[in-house]
Image (spheres, rainbow, N blue to C red):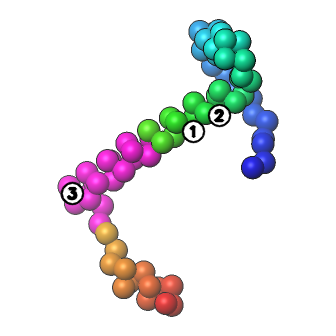
């Protein structure tokens, strides 16, 4: 996996916590942030799935039959 350097701003509390955990676990801060974001994205995936299901149940969103998708794709 290719790594990309990024810059962002977070509160001083988060930085202090990150530095403390990094020292105690002897892990790079970037590794801790990457793992934390990955876990949070998994959480968000669940929230998005729940939202999409509610949207389907309420009629706010509609499904497309597979046959229509296949036809549009020429399959």
- The image shows residue 26, relative to residue 31, as above or below, that is above
Residue 22 is situated, as x and y percent measured from the top left of the image, at 69, 16
What's the mark number on residue 57?
3
Q: Main secondary structure of the magenta part?
A: helix
First in sequence: mark 1 vs mark 3: 1
Q: Residue at x 57, y 38 (%)?
A: 38
Residue 49 is situated, as x and y percent measured from the top left of the image, at 36, 50
Q: Residue at x 75, y 34 (%)?
A: 6
Residue where numbered disc 2 is placed? 34
Residue where numbered disc 1 is placed? 38
Label pair 2/1, CB-CB below 8 angstroms? yes
Q: Residue at x 32, y 47 (%)?
A: 51
Residue 15 seen in this snapshot: no
**Residues under labels 3 and 2: Cα distance?**
35 Å
**Residues under labels 2 and 1: Cα distance?**
6 Å
Residue 67 is situated, as x and y percent measured from the top left of the image, at 36, 85
Instruction: Name the secondary structure under disc 3.
Output: helix
Q: Nearer the viewer, residue 34 or 25?
A: 25
């Amino acid at each position: 996996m290719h790594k990309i350097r990024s810059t962002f701003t977070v509160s001083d509390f988060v930085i202090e916590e990150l530095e403390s955990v990094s020292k105690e676990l002897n892990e790079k801060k970037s590794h801790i942030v990457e793992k934390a974001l990955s876990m949070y994205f998994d959480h968000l995936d669940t929230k998005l799935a729940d939202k999409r299901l509610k949207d389907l149940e309420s009629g706010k969103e509609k499904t497309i039959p597979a046959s229509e998708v296949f036809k549009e794709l020429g399959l």
